[in-house]
Image (spheres, rainbow, N blue to C red):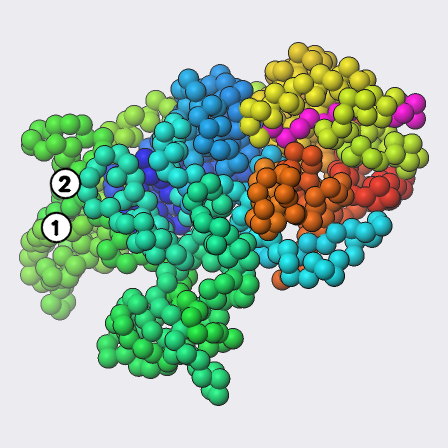
């Protein structure tokens, strides 16, 4: 099954017209009217529809509004919901226990333990993590009843394990992938660039994910292949969907026309795939992908630059495809490393386009070279062409208008409906025919002049408002010399169309009626009492400070800086943890251990063993960064398990779920300034034995990637022994500075050759601790794992000194 994840109506219709079996549309819970209309139109095209309500911000999207949006999606006939964080999952299960739910985003399937958790929760499907190899996918899916989804093309949030909250949310993180980064190594505690790096190590975050061939994904158990096309424009969506449709049909045994491999790559030459999969790219193209300076990702290659005339800044273009006058063209260098250059064709065409094979002069807006590729680029909001908009349902119109009588319109629809069943009354396989009648409220009167003509009325009634309906036979019977207000004609047409669509889609809506009936909560009903805002406590308790650090940070210096606790990262041995915790407890600090980021079943097994060792070494708290580790960690430390920031406990529903699951507390990830959710007024959650923390300072953790691009690609040598990456043998973090806007990130490596990404430093705000105390929190967390030894101590002292 081929599904396209889209953002606009034009993209959705283009995807279905190019062969997608279904679409996943993004809908704002507070603006669902347009989404319900789009769901109806896509069902008219015979497509399946899933709804992505996005990451929930509790302060902007109250629980009752989100639950009501879920019920309206079910009532409109959507097949299911895509949830991306723990709060949305808990709310969906509480509000709509029988509706199909697919886990994605932060909840992507990464291990067999997480699969078992989703099966117990009643989920119908889950995205597989892009970090998993094919064998790991097969192992995680073994014996599963879940339907597995996998991204095969398009923009991805490539890191796994980091929460997507606040200003560092999905859109901000996706923007990182089109940037080019310069690495700087810290020397003697100072963040100064090494001159020998120069332009040698440019990193593009698009290279951090792996793509698996479609055939291997199918054999591994993946049933739904997803193209992430959100915001890419209808032309881009249609071009990519056509290529994958032909390939999927071939894999499913439909021996029709299958483009050759060279033709497929030409069709996708202007779009980016999601990384460097085994055997998918040859070594010669790796450096081109890593060093691409232009955003890529939209447009189609339409020609080449033959020559450049520097005197008047013009280039001679040879077109390989037809180019319209209204098309926007860009030239992009073949080797990467340069920005795209805008082109304006100056030679006038014979008609409204230049045919393929033409040689045309163009004004250039920058430096281009002979051999550069010319791309046709579409604006994201452009409408699809007529051949990409599917019209599966034919509508006949019969209208009657007589003096002293209202307008009567009869619509008859006939088309192939996925819910019509194998055989209908008229003998057509899967063909559904419905007929409706609508009568106006205003009577026709004699006109002063010529009156309404049958041609004008037929033209007005054949307008379907952009719906995927095809006008068939249109017959109007109008007595001469009559007048009827145009607004009345439009009202009758709209009411008749709405009635026709509801009747035509009634089998689909009937299947969802039970779901919507049980799932539609009253706006005044609260879900299990968890809907709260930042409620103020009458007696705010003292809030303590916990710092997340590496094992080389002196605990005595942290205690002197004003911290009350220290949380050690997992890259430490048993003996090192025992010595560190003993020294920290001697300084009066609460000791916590943060689990590893579990990216596969192997990581889970190692993380479980490390948690048990940390408990034996003297850890007071075990902080788990994956919900799949919760059951195993409760066996190791039944009363000391806390869900960490990686679990994305960022809403009241997720807090309730964490406490009900047996956790001794939770840590809310960084949600942005002023966006921290309030703790529910619930005795079970606000009790003295529940740790309630929130990350408010340091550098927020953005996630991890298993593929070491620096060693495997830029080092140009395979295997650990021959790794020539600049981070080899160093324990320090690296500063990543964007060559465009100067955005600074931190990149750290661990002893398993994985990369961990940290965001920009969070600004300090006076009075933050008192505010969080009033909201029900008793701990604030500072993520200082991306700091140097001296930098971590200074950052902790700055925060505690500011609050004091």
The residue located at (84%, 36%) in the rendering is 553
Please state the horizontal and vertical placement of residue 122, each as a whole percent of the image.
Answer: 45, 19
115, 654: nearer the viewer: 115
**Which residue is rendered at x = 40% and y = 73% of the image?**
305
The label shown at residue 52 is: none
Give the x, y percent position of residue 752: 65, 33
- Provide the secondary structure element on which disc 2 rests: strand
Instruction: Determine which quarter of the picture holds residue 42.
Output: top left
* For residue 660, side relative to residue 458 (left or right): right
Q: Earlier in the sequence, mark 1 or mark 2?
A: 2
Quadrant for the N terminus in the image: top left
Q: Circle 2 sits on which residue? A: 414
Q: Residue at x 45, y 52 (%)?
A: 272
In this rendered view, identify the residue nearer to me: 778 or 307.
Answer: 307
Residue 287: x and y in percent read 53, 55
Q: How many marks?
A: 2
Which type of secondary structure does the marked residue at label 1 adopt?
strand
The residue that mark 1 highlights is 472
**Up-down: is 434 above or below 310?**
above
Disc 1 to disc 2: CB gap under 8 Å = yes
Q: Which residue sits at x=41%, y=48%?
A: 229
Q: Residue furthest bottom?
A: 311
Residue range corresponding to the magenta coloring: 583-598
Is residue 658 among the parts visible in the rendering?
A: no
Residue 730 magenta: no
Describe residue 794's horizontal placement relative to residue 727 as left or right: right
Quick one: quadrant of the C terminus? Answer: top right
Gap in angstroms between the C-alphas marked 1 and 2 = 10 Å
């Amino acid at each position: 099954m081929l599904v396209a994840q889209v953002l606009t109506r034009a993209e959705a219709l283009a995807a279905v017209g190019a062969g997608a079996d279904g679409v996943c549309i993004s809908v704002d819970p507070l603006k669902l009217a347009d989404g319900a209309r789009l769901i109806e139109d896509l069902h008219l095209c015979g497509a399946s529809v899933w709804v992505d309500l996005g990451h929930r911000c509790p302060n902007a999207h109250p629980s009752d509004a989100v639950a009501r949006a879920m019920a309206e999606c079910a009532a409109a006939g959507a097949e299911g919901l895509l949830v991306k964080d723990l709060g949305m999952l808990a709310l969906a299960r509480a509000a709509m226990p029988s509706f199909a739910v697919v886990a994605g985003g932060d909840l992507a399937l990464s291990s067999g333990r997480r699969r078992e958790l989703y099966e117990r929760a009643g989920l119908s499907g889950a995205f597989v993590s892009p970090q998993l190899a094919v064998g790991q996918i097969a192992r995680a899916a073994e014996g599963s009843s879940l339907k597995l989804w996998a991204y095969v093309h398009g923009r991805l949030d490539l890191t796994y394990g980091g929460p997507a909250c606040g200003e560092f949310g999905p859109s901000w993180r996706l923007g990182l992938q089109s940037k080019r980064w310069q690495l700087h190594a810290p020397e003697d505690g100072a963040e100064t660039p090494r001159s020998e790096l120069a332009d040698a190590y440019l990193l593009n975050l698009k290279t951090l994910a792996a793509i698996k061939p479609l055939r291997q994904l199918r054999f591994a158990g993946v049933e739904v292949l997803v193209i992430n096309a959100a915001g890419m424009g209808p032309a881009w969506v249609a071009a990519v969907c056509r290529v994958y449709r032909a390939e999927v049909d071939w894999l499913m045994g439909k021996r029709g026309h299958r483009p050759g491999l060279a033709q497929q790559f030409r069709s996708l030459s202007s779009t980016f795939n999601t990384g460097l999969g085994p055997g998918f790219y040859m070594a010669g193209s790796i450096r081109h992908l890593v060093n691409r300076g232009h955003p890529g990702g939209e447009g189609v290659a339409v020609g080449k630059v033959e020559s450049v005339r520097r005197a008047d800044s013009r280039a001679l273009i040879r077109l390989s495809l037809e180019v319209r006058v209204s098309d926007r063209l860009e030239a992009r260098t073949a080797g990467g490393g340069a920005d795209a250059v805008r082109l304006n064709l100056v030679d006038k065409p014979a008609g409204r386009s230049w045919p393929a094979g033409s040689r045309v002069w163009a004004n250039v807006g920058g430096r281009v070279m002979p051999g550069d590729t010319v791309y046709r680029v579409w604006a994201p909001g452009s409408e699809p062409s007529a051949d990409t908009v599917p019209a599966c349902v034919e509508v006949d119109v019969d209208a009657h208008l007589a003096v002293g009588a209202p307008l009567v319109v009869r619509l008859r629809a006939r088309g192939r409906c996925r819910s019509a069943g194998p055989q209908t009354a008229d003998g057509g396989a899967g063909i559904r025919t419905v007929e409706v009648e609508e009568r106006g409220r205003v009577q026709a009167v004699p006109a002063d002049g010529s009156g309404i003509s049958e041609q004008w009325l037929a033209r007005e009634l054949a307008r379907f408002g952009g719906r995927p309906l095809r006008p068939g036979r249109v017959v109007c019977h109008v007595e001469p010399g009559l007048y009827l207000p145009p607004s009345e004609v439009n009202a009758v047409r709209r009411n008749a169309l709405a009635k026709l669509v509801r009747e035509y889609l009634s089998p689909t809506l009937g299947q969802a009626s039970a779901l919507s009936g049980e799932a539609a909560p009253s706006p005044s009903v609260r879900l299990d009492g968890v809907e709260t805002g930042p409620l103020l406590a009458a007696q705010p308790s003292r809030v303590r400070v916990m710092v997340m650090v590496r094992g080389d940070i002196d605990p005595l210096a942290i205690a002197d800086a004003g911290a009350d606790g220290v949380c050690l990262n997992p890259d430490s041995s048993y003996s090192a943890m025992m010595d560190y915790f003993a020294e920290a407890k001697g300084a009066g600090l609460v000791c916590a251990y943060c689990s590893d980021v579990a990216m596969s079943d192997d990581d889970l097994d190692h993380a479980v063993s490390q948690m048990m060792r940390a408990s034996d070494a003297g850890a007071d708290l075990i902080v788990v960064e994956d919900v799949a580790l919760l059951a195993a960690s409760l066996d190791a430390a039944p009363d000391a398990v806390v869900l960490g920031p990686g679990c994305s406990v960022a809403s009241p529903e997720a807090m309730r779920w964490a406490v009900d699951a047996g956790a001794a507390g939770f840590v809310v990830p960084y949600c942005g300034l002023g966006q921290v959710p309030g703790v529910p007024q619930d005795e079970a959650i606000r009790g003295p034995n529940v740790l309630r923390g929130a990350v408010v300072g340091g550098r927020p953790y953005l996630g991890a990637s298993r593929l070491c691009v620096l060693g495997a690609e830029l080092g140009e040598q395979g295997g650990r022994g021959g790794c020539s990456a600049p981070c080899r043998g160093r324990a320090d973090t690296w500063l990543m500075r964007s060559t465009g806007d100067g955005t600074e990130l931190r990149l750290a490596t661990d002893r398993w050759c994985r990369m961990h990404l940290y965001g920009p430093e969070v600004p300090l705000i006076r009075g933050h601790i008192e505010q969080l105390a009033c909201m029900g929190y008793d701990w604030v967390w500072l993520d200082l794992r991306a700091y140097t030894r001296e930098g971590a101590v200074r950052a902790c002292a700055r925060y505690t000194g500011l609050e004091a």
